[in-house]
Amino acid sequence: QAYSASFVEPWLGGKKPHSLSLSTYYTVQSNGLKKSDDKRQAMDIFGVSVGFGRRLKWPDDYFSLYNELSYQNYILKNYSYGYLFSFSDGNSRNISFRTTFNRSSIDQPIYPRKGSLVSLSLQLTPPYSLLSGRDYINMTDKEKYKWIEYHKWTFNSNYITKLAGDLVLSTKVEFGFLGIYNQDYGPSPFEGYNMGGDGLVSYNLYGKETISLRGYGNGSISPLNGGNIYNKFSFEVRYPLSLNPNATLYLLTFAEGGNSWNKFEEFKPFNVKRSAGVGIRIFLPMFGKLGVDWGYGFDEAVRPGENHSQFHFIIGQNF
């Protein structure tokens, strides 16, 4: 089950392009049994956020800054899904602040022919373990993770290059790192990365960020309990069949590679899982962007057998 509501005001006050965003959501992941059943396993997630964005005039007019304050509450009830968590009952709360520095010179959002999009984001929580003075080495995980702490760094870049006419090349580079304040506390069980597959949702129901890598099964690239660092390279050649604003249609071929690791010491940016394939995209005003890709993964995934030929359905992902 999943419920969500959001509100965005792109011109707060009506004079300048300052944006205000509000959102809330509630999701339930369970084994399908009734609440009265003792064998029911479930994780409820409640979240709320408020964000404020504004354009900057320095270094140039293409820059913007977005700040967001968010709260999540993860409620585990007999949720013993093996490797996912080291405790099965309890609450984990996440209060975080995120700031994103962004530069976008993309000429249009549906089928861009030139420009770039570069963003650097930092999301962090208070360093509870450094302030409390408690013994986190001998503490149970249920007690330790009542309040989640981390600092999370994300870098994304996408450069659009015109090759000939409307034929364009999209070159993407991504990097993400989930850091810790205290070795005794260790990495957060939430907010890490699951790499592989279509990346259909940016956050899955296990509280980890989903990173797409076509040609592989969903989540099949990351370590079994999710990764804490990842990087990805992607090259995509696109050619339009229709540039009608009411029904934009284009073909694409891609080659990409990425990987995910548990520790920064294990990070090898060019030791990636590789894939290639073809796809199609259509933009309809009433549905947004839809598509299907076929990809072939050339390297063995963490979960054996989840590479080679894979079809992926795409909904709502941008350029």
Image (cartoon, rainbow, N blue to C red):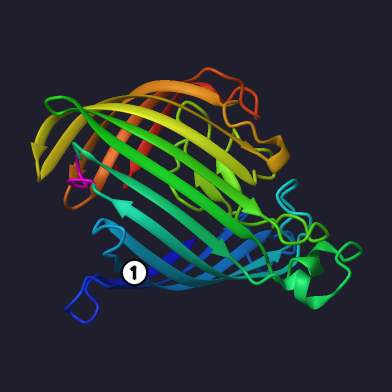
> Residue 15: which quarter of the image?
bottom left
Amino acid type at mark 1: Gly
Whole-percent x, y for residue 150 in the image: 65, 61
Q: Residue at x 69, y 60 (%)?
A: 40
- In which quadrant of the rendered view does residue 251 lie? top left
Q: Among all residues in the image, which is located at the extreme left?
A: 244
Q: x, y (%) of residue 62?
A: 26, 56
Residue 7 among those drawn in magenta: no
Check the picture and name the quadrant holding the C terminus.
top left
Q: Is residue 22 above or below residue 140?
A: below
Residue 7: in sight, yes or no?
Answer: yes
What predominant SS class does the magenta segment belong to?
Answer: loop
The residue that disc 1 covers is: 53
Instruction: Locate residue 175 relative to residue 86 in the image: left or right.
Output: left
Camera-side residue: 50 or 121?
121
Give the percent coordinates (x, y) of residue 297: 50, 21
Q: Name the residue: 20% across, 40% down.
A: 112
Give the extent of the magenta segment. 106-111
Eyeballing the image, is 97 above or below 286? below
Q: Residue at x 71, y 65 (%)?
A: 77
Q: Nearer the viewer, residue 264 or 218?
A: 264
